[in-house]
Amino acid sequence: MKVLITGGAGFLGQRLARELLARGELRNADGQLRPITELVLLDVVAAPGPDDARVRIEVGDIAERSVLERLIDDRTAASFHLAAIVSGQAESDFDLGMRINLDASRQLLDVCRMRGHRPRVVFTSSVAVYGGDLPDVVLDDTALNPQSSYGAQKAIAELLLNDYSRRGFVDGRVLRLPTISVRPGKPNAAASSFASGIIREPLNGEKAVCPVSGATRVWLLSPRKAVECLVAACQIDAAALGNRRTVNLPGVSVSVDQMIAALRELAGDAVAARIEWQAEDRVEKIVGGWPARWDTSRAAQLGLHGDASFKDIVRAFIDDELGGKIAQH
Amino acid sequence: MKVLITGGAGFLGQRLARELLARGELRNADGQLRPITELVLLDVVAAPGPDDARVRIEVGDIAERSVLERLIDDRTAASFHLAAIVSGQAESDFDLGMRINLDASRQLLDVCRMRGHRPRVVFTSSVAVYGGDLPDVVLDDTALNPQSSYGAQKAIAELLLNDYSRRGFVDGRVLRLPTISVRPGKPNAAASSFASGIIREPLNGEKAVCPVSGATRVWLLSPRKAVECLVAACQIDAAALGNRRTVNLPGVSVSVDQMIAALRELAGDAVAARIEWQAEDRVEKIVGGWPARWDTSRAAQLGLHGDASFKDIVRAFIDDELGGKIAQH
């Protein structure tokens, strides 16, 4: 079988690619494990790897239908659609957000539909689909009420994937990811970028700026567990999902103060002291509108599991990205 | 000011046009009443009227951006977007439904945005945005869970209008219309077409076929009240809506048996006997998924009112469309 990853040059796409290659096979719609013979990594820049004979690196604009038509064929059993314009950038560049978060998602569904073999499609969505007056505990089917263009675009993509699945055009599933933390690399334009930065930068010996108050609660998932969930979600039997194709992934709910306490416990006072506070209204407003308490029992029933604690998340980052070493200088 | 009605040749567009011309003015964003100097009626066929110097009849494909760019300019204070592909047809012709219910709605919002003066935009949406396991009473912010492509497309248009409004590109409002009954004219491809047909055809001396069981509950609004609500909604102060741009209009909740009892009471046994029963699974499935109980207190607070009873609805149809006469032959 052939597998496509959009956003294949991104850090999550790269990790997912490595995981899929290591497994070497995926469960198909007929319930059988089939070898992955070709893994296509599509992005606007060339993916740096992985170096593997099964990998095909493609550069292209995912909002161009011809690009998707070239890369999705009747051997494509599954597409993981990770490409996105993050929340901060979708707010500052409305047209770009619409083009990538909405148009490209729709094109991908529609090209899959045209192929006619009902391929599996896995979308990532976001807690940003919620907002406004929320119930105490958020469920998979709590009302969508996005307060950002990014959230609106993701909510629309969810609705499209659900309808394309209901009609039998694709066999889709959408995972609403908690904020991924700890992301490696550089800060990005996502409003939630600080949720990685305040851990990553201090562990790398650098200063970090926290734009929200210590009481702000966030809902977090490690990259390691996110990738495990993506692979598991792709293999869920369609009958177990029915017409409810959207699943909230389990996260760890912590305050920023608790995040810093975990960092201090694992890495010491000197590392935790590298965090500076500088309130940013725009970020506080976006992040403060996201819910912090969830009922993710449906994810658990479907075999999708998160991290045990935030300390585990920080430990996984130190192991996976820093080779176990913390900068103490 | 200039006002645009899309779907201007349709029965609701025609009634709305007559109402706007009779009033002659609309409350603007600044709270002042302004004369309507031009009323543009756009549709795929030429609107039959009204015959009035202020009316400009335009034929064009609403999904073509150039058509909207030609008709919406910086004098356009309000656009009523009524053009739609109905539920049954959007299910049988997926691409057409996407083009008109989604693409055209988005183009309209986007052309308004490009004009830069934040014009008012009134969309009509539908109870078809709901479905699945519903709460006992449906609220404006009950979770969207469309079970038809029509419902999905309307839900997406709602999300777009809300985001375009939040960003200040337009001053939008969406009314979720109950099923409009009694519609004049011929049956259409809407799954709810019977909710007019079982009253209209018998009153016209013709047989009607009812495709759902007598216990099926529907949620109904007369064309007269629908038009009043559209005009009122356009004039609501933006501050009263805040970021919640979608409002469920009040309907009358009745069973099909109760509808027929009202018809019998007003028109007699011979008229009511013109209804034949012929179950149609496809229709029963779509209509059965729509909710029947609602809390529309927000609509009332905003000054949007429905009919007092189904008998009132039938009486209004007899008065407005039949000149007070019932075919007894």
Image (tube, coloured by chain):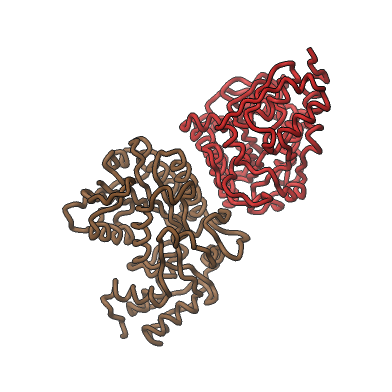
Chain colours: A brown, B red
Q: Is residue B39 visible?
A: no
| Name of the residue lying farthest toward the top | B329
Q: How many marks?
A: 0
Q: Position of residue A206 (x, y in %)?
A: 35, 78
Question: As rendered, which of A273 and B117 lies closer to the eye?
Answer: A273
Q: Is residue B80 visible?
A: yes
Question: As rendered, which of B62 and A3 lies closer to the eye?
Answer: A3
Query: Left or right: where does residue A144 sit relative to residue A210?
Result: right
Residue B46 vs B35, above or below: the answer is above
Query: Left or right: where does residue A180 sit relative to residue B238?
Result: left
Question: As rendered, which of B74 and B94 lies closer to the eye?
Answer: B94
Q: Position of residue A56 (x, y in %)?
A: 22, 49
Q: Residue at x 55, y 32 (%)?
A: B282
Q: Position of residue A307 (x, y in %)?
A: 40, 70
Residue B25 vs A119, above or below: the answer is above
| Name of the residue lying farthest toward the left | A53
Give the quadrant of the C terminus of chain A. bottom left
Residue B186 occupies which quadrant of the picture? top right
Residue B217 occupies which quadrant of the picture? top right
Q: Position of residue B17 (x, y in %)?
A: 71, 28
Residue A112 vs A149, above or below: the answer is above
| Name of the residue lying farthest toward the bottom | A269
Q: Residue at x 54, y 67 (%)?
A: A293
